[in-house]
Image: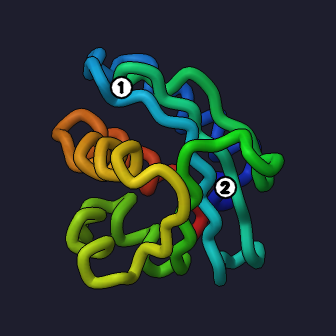
Amino acid sequence: MAAYGSAEWLAALEELAVDLPETPGVTVRAELAVSGTPEGDVAYQLDVSNGQVMSTAAGPAADGTVDVSIAMTYSLASSILGGSEDANAAYMRGDLKPTGHTGRLLDLLAWSQTGPVRKLGVELAARTDA
């Protein structure tokens, strides 16, 4: 089990993402800031190119290095990761707090709700400390 957003957790994400299918057009560098985790507030970066996770990194991104930044609570992040919450619905309700490139955000949200990515989320949630 790994703490949400930790280096071990990000390594598990990358391991699970190896089998994701290519999704042309889904290319985004994102920063996710999650408040209220058991370890405190955490941030991590995700680099996706054509639906393939190219890299992850713990910590906040340097200014200007990401297309979109998304802030959310740990409760919401856990629900999205575990598959009980739809990221698009959370965005429409205003529960996700994005800044940056709206088009890339919408691509990322749509991609996050595809079957393979949702399966990855459920598997990653099973490896995450509660």
Horizontally, residue 14 falls left or right of residue 44, namely: left
Q: Is residue 19 left or right of residue 15?
A: left
At 39% from the left and 51% from the top, the residue drawn is: 105
Q: Vertically, is 91 above or below 50? A: below
The answer to whether residue 122 shows anywhere in this view is: no
| Disc 1 packing (10 Å; few <14; some 14–19; many ≥20) | many
Give the residue at x 60% y 64%: 129
Total numbered circles: 2
Q: Residue at x 37, y 20 (%)?
A: 50
Residue 51: give x, y in percent of width and height: 35, 25
Asked whether 104 or 11 is in front, the reply is: 104
Residue behind mark 2: 5
Judged from the image, the secondary structure of the residue bearing numbered disc 1 is: loop
Q: Mark 1, mark 2: which one is toward the viewer?
A: 1
Q: Check disc 1 and give the amino acid type.
A: Gly
Q: Which of these two is toward me, 20 or 60?
A: 60
Under circle 2, the secondary element is loop
Give the quarter of the figure containing the C terminus. bottom right
Residue type at tag 2: Gly
Q: Earlier in the sequence, mark 1 or mark 2?
A: 2
Residue 88 pos. (x, y %): 24, 64
The vertical placement of 115 against 72, above or below, is: above
Q: Which residue is mark 1?
A: 51
| Residue 90 found in image quarter | bottom left
Q: Is residue 13 above or below residue 97?
A: above
Residue 19, above or below 31? above
| Horizontal side, residue 112 vs residue 81: left or right | left
Camera sees residue 100: yes
